[in-house]
Structures are given as C-alpha cells and as structure tokens.
Image (cartoon, rainbow, N blue to C red):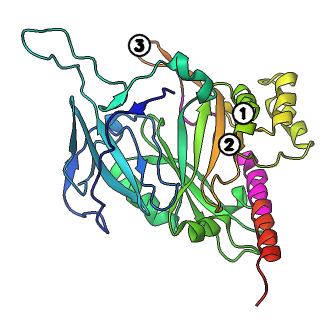
Amino acid sequence: MEGRQPLTPPLTLPPPPPSPPSTPTVPVASPSTTDLRSEPSPSRSLTLPKPSASASPTALAPPFPPADLGQGFALAEVELYGDVVLRYVSRPKTPPFPSEAHRTPVKLPAFLPGFEDVDESETSSFTYGIRRLDHAVGNVPELAPAVRYIAGFTGFHEFAEFTADDVGTAESGLNSVVLANNEETVLVPLNEPVHGTKRRSQIQTYLDHNGGAGVQHLALASDDVLKTLREMRARTGMGGFDFMPPPPPNYYQGVRRRAGDVLTEEQIKECQELGVLVDRDDQGVLLQIFTKPVGDRPTIFIEIIQRIGCMVKDKEGKEYQKGGCGGFGKGNFSELFKSIEDYEKSLEAKQATTVPSA
C-alpha cells in the first residue's frame, strides 16, 4: 500500500439526490474506488480495488456530470446505501504526450492528480504489511431491496449468502448477502438485522447508533497477518486499535482439524497467541481478526485478513489469487458475534453504573 500525500484540496462534490433516477442509463468509466462520505460518522470512507469495466458496463446516471480531474482522469458517483456512494474513477489508457514536438509520454500519477507518489520502501514500516482493501461490509435495514438495487446497476452477482442459522447466536442474528463483480475481485457484503430474538440484533444496534445504513467494517488484506499483528501490537503504546477478545483455547483444536495440513503447528500456536480466527472452505484458508469499534459508538470496526490458496493463472500465464478465497469466515461467525454481544453487554453495564437513575 503506497503512502500518498495530497498536494491539492480535496474535490468538493454536490450531494446525491434523495432517490436515484429510474429511466436513463449511461456508460460509466471502469469503477475503481468507493468513497463513503464522513459526515458525521467515520464509517463512510474507503477505497476498493479496481474491478474490470466488463463487470459493470452501465450504471444509473450519476447525480452530476463526471468531474474532470485532469491528465485524462475523471470521476463520478452513484448512491449505494444510506449516504454511502459508489465512486467511479476513469484512468487514461495511455500516457499523453506534452506536445507533438516532445514524444516522451507524460508520467502519470500512480493514484490521482494532486497526489504525490511516495517510495514504498520508505513507508513500509507504517503499513504493517497491509496491502489493500479486501472487502467493505454494509449494514442496511432491509436486505432484499438493497441487493436488488445494487445488483441492478452494477451487474454484480450473488457470491455468497448467510442466514441467522449460519451467523447468529442464541440471543441475536442477522442475514447477509455478498455481491461480487464477474472476476470476483470486488466484494460487497450486506447485512440486515433479524428481529424477534432475545436481544436486539447487533445490526439494529449499529443502525440506531449510526443514524441509518452505513459501513459496518473494512477488511484490510495482508500477505502475512501474523507479522502484521506483531507489528501493530509492538506499537500499541503509540495508540491504535483494541482487538476483540480471543476465542477459548479449545477453539484451536478445531483449527488443527480444519487447517492442520496448511498451517504448521508453530503458526497455529501463534494464531492462538494473537487471537487470530481460522476458517476454511473447499478452495482455501482464511485467517482473520477483528478490532473493537474504532470510535465511541458500536459502529465501524476493522478486520485484518489473510487468504491462503486459490492460486490460478490468467490468459498470459500470470499467477493470481481468486477473489474471496477461503470464504468469509462462516465457521467463525458465531465466535465473532458472541464477542460483539459481549462487548455490547459491557457497554450496557458501564452505562448502568454511570447514568444516575431518575
């Protein structure tokens, strides 16, 4: 992940309309980033990896004409959910020439005009080994209309689906759908609350505290999650994230059965020491750990993730990892949501001792 410093003020964009247009559709440049506005909650700003233009050739007309950023870059936005927007960024296919007299192509910025490229070797100690955004999970009041709307204008297909039986606990639950582009390199999971359970759904708690739909968590991918966590914990004294409590020791007996042929005994012991959760599907292995909410409300949190396996070759023989390798931790959902429930209970207990009775 490159560190970049903005050289110009950020682009100011007009707010989206209250509802998307229902008739005209227009071709949109290949989508590469998603921007979630950060007023007033911090849970509305992220960047997604670039999907292929063929994955979503058309989208609803954006609420404003595409903004020209210069040097062949352009930007447009479409509503996603809540006040979250999907941002499309178009990049020039070939570097332009400054003039016919000078045929040396202009060096294009690695990110966007107005940002300065920074030598990755100089900033590696501050990235903790995190390479990119793996996925961004949204919480919405109702799943079906949100999935229908997003799939309708992106062309994304259903990659996975989970119900309360898969991801709930004895006290609460949720339903979830993961949408993906054709190459399954851009993943958009969505959650809705399940009602009528003993406790209020964690998704409903999020919606109440966030003031509506928003991003529940950002999954940041590392090539070595154990090294990343050691780096992060080594800097805990400088401030940073608090992680969810680790699972009980007997959890890792199951890890040995599920993934003992992929992870060494030393790696499994380190997973236990660091509190890393391990899951597996029919294609690969998933390592993941979650922070507590990063603000003072039970809203957005961070996931650190590593996917192992699923290596395939493209038409040119270049090897790459299939999107969503190892799944989304279905085997860990109960453990995660029990941790979130326990965290919410601790907040409730704290409020009960600090708020005087009427």
State how many labels appear. Answer: 3
25 left or right, relative to 31: left
Judge whether residue 132 can be spotted in this image.
yes
Disc 1 and disc 3 in contact, CB within 8 angstroms: no
Of helix, strand and loop, which one carries label 1? loop
331 left or right, relative to 303: right
CA separation in Å, label 1 and label 2: 8 Å
Of helix, strand and loop, which one carries label 3? loop
Q: Nearer the viewer, mark 3 or mark 2?
A: 2
Q: What kind of secondary structure does the magenta stretch mostly adopt? A: helix
341 left or right, relative to 71: right
Q: Earlier in the sequence, mark 3 or mark 2?
A: 2
Is 179 rendered above or below residue 201? Answer: above
Seen at 69% across and 42% down, the residue is 239
Seen at 25% across and 54% down, the residue is 62
Residue under pointer 1: 235
Residue under pointer 3: 316
* Highlighted range, magenta: 322-342
Residue under pointer 2: 240
